[in-house]
Image (cartoon, grey):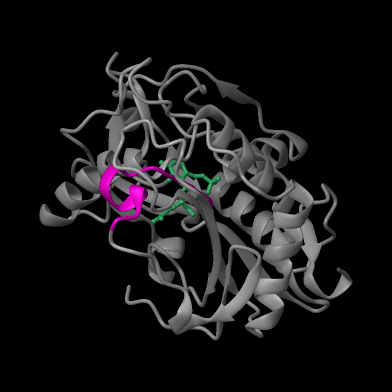
Amino acid sequence: MGIQPTSYIWHNGRLVPWEEARVHVMTHALHYGSSVFEGIRAYGTPRGPAILGLRPHVNRLFASCKIYQMAIPYSPEEVAQAILNTVRANGLRDCYIRPLVFRGMGTMALDGRECPTEVIIAALEMGKYLGEEGLRQGIDVMVSSWQRMAPNTFPAMAKIGGQYINSQLIAMEAHDRGFAEGLALSTEGFVSEGSGENIFVVKDGVLYTPPSYASLLPGITRGFVIQLARDMGYPVREEPVAREMLYWADEIFLTGTAAEITPVRSVDGILVGDGQRGPVTTRIQEEFFGIVTGQKEDRFGWLTFVEDR
Ligand code: PPE
């Protein structure tokens, strides 16, 4: 997916033209992966563009920075407002927003806390991450030979740039073998998550998803789906998911800001159910897309309308 430039990027407090948003090659984050980021979507609605999960995404950005001891020189409210301003300035409707907080140029020390903290917010046009067809028919995935980080090695719950080497290895391996995505196990051998998505397994009308201690990023979309599914009357169990549940499931779907709610039709070449998007996945997708596009009432308060602020 090539990046299509937009007009402005918010950089350290102001909107600058796309070409001017640059860093020096001695930027700490470039050498050591010392960054924290978010991925947020805005959807076009009848009331103009709306940001999905603005508050939880900003909160997670600040939580990741706290875990990683990187002070953001702005308040959460300022960052939230800057996100809205960036979408508005670029005249975007459906888009993907990428806030990034990183250690800039200052020292070459591994303890880079003396480096200035830089913040950028970019907003890009983005279509369906795993394809339109994937959303309808499901994707083929494999269990990766790469595992997620062991507890107390990297803070899996924080969305830190350097940690995404693990996700990159998982994604590259899957693509080289002809799969759309790879699923990683935890070092204990339980299902953790995809390279950039959380996972739900449906069996006999019950939804199972790995708990936050399974070395995963607690996704905002995961939280929305848990809330929505429970509201729709489906039991949701956050508990360790054995690998074989992937082969025994009636339905599987992945959740993420980019991936939205993407059905999985096979794992390791074994069909999930009958290899079609299942009824539970379909109902949850319909409800989710109805809410985020403003066709159904925003009954959980997930949306922030860009024109209102
Ligand atoms: N796990 C990982 C490892 C992950 O990167 C994401 C988001 C999720 C789970 C789902 O989290 P949430 O978006 O809050 O529901 N992955 C982001 C980045 C993907 C990328 O290619 O870059 C995303 O979806 O924005």
Q: Residue at x 85, y 60 (%)?
A: 297
Q: Residue at x 43, y 71 (%)?
A: 132
Q: Quadrant of residue 290?
A: bottom right
Q: Residue at x 21, y 53 (%)?
A: 179
Query: How far from the left and from the top, in percent, is residue 66?
Result: 58, 31
Taking depth in this image into account, of 225 and 219 the one nearest to the observer is 219
Query: How far from the left and from the top, in percent, is residue 283?
Result: 63, 52
Going by the image, does 190 lie left or right of 217?
left
Q: From this view, report whether residue 168 is shown above or below residue 183.
A: below
Q: Residue 31 lies in magenta, yes or no? A: yes
Q: Residue 43 lies in magenta, yes or no? A: no
Query: How far from the left and from the top, in percent, is residue 31?
Result: 26, 48
Going by the image, does 214 lie left or right of 33?
right
Q: Is residue 203 visible?
A: no
State the extent of the magenta-drawn residues as a range.
26-38
Going by the image, does 133 lie left or right of 89?
left
The number of numbered discs placed on residues in the rendered structure image is 0
